[in-house]
Amino acid sequence: MTTLPPFQVLLDEHAADVMAVLRGAVGGSDADDCFQETFLAALRAYPKLNDAGNLRGWLLTIAYRKAVDHHRANGRRPLPVAEIKEASVEDPEPGDGIWTMVRELPPKQRAAVALRYGCDLPHTEIATALGCSPEAARRSLHEGIKRLRKELA
């Protein structure tokens, strides 16, 4: 176990290597911020460090992790986009679209499709509402969807 040099000596000896790694990892514009974060983290952890055997590797590991943190943070930031035109949203007329076709299905199929996609019920609750087994409810739903697909094609 070797003794730790003063932190300023560590900074002077390895600053160029750390900056080179960060420029390659995050680019020149963000390297300065990551450099500061790297050495702040190192300064906080330095008094607890037990071995001075590979200080360069230790610093480069911290720098790498700060670069990863930087990329993760950028992934969560909203990106500016061009102005989006507002589109008016109108309620569809009753009787328009797919629900008109659903209304034309046989009663059990119509009820199964409406309960599944209109009310988001699972098959067991659809079966209870229809007074049949879950398998029969699943079959009615399947047949209703099959018929809708055929009419839409």
Image (cartoon, rainbow, N blue to C red):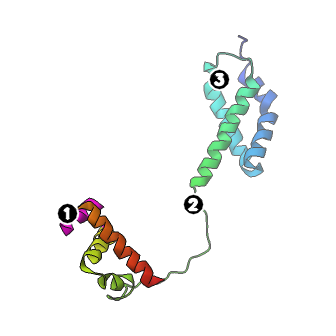
Kind of residue sitting beneath label 3? Tyr
Kind of residue sitting beneath label 1? Thr
Q: Judge depth for marks 2 and 3 and give the one in front.
A: 2
Q: To which residue does mark 1 refer?
A: 128
Q: Dominant secondary structure of the magenta stretch?
A: helix
Earlier-in-chain disc, 2 versus 3 = 3
Is residue 125 toward the left or the right of residue 14 in the image?
left
Q: Residues within 10 Å of mark 2 (few under 14, many from 20)?
A: few
In space, the residues marked 3 and 1 are separated at their CA atoms by 66 Å
Query: What SS does tag 1 mark?
Result: helix
Q: Residues within 10 Å of mark 1 (few under 14, many from 20)?
A: few
Q: Judge depth for marks 1 and 2 and give the one in front.
A: 1
**Residue 78: image tag:** 2
Residue visible at 37% across and 86% down in the picture: 92
Query: What SS does tag 3 mark?
Result: helix
User: Percent from the top left, x then y, of residue 16?
Assistant: 81, 35
Q: Label 3 near label 2: C-beta < 8 Å?
A: no
* Residue 84 seen anywhere in this rendered image of the structure: yes
Residue visible at 74% across and 23% down in the picture: 55
**Residue 46: image tag:** 3
Residues shaded magenta:
120-132
In space, the residues marked 2 and 3 are separated at their CA atoms by 35 Å
Q: Is residue 42 above or below residue 127?
A: above
User: Percent from the top left, x then y, of residue 74?
Assistant: 62, 53
Kind of residue sitting beneath label 2? Pro
In this orientation, which residue lies closer to the viewer: 138 or 58?
A: 138
Earlier-in-chain disc, 1 versus 2 = 2
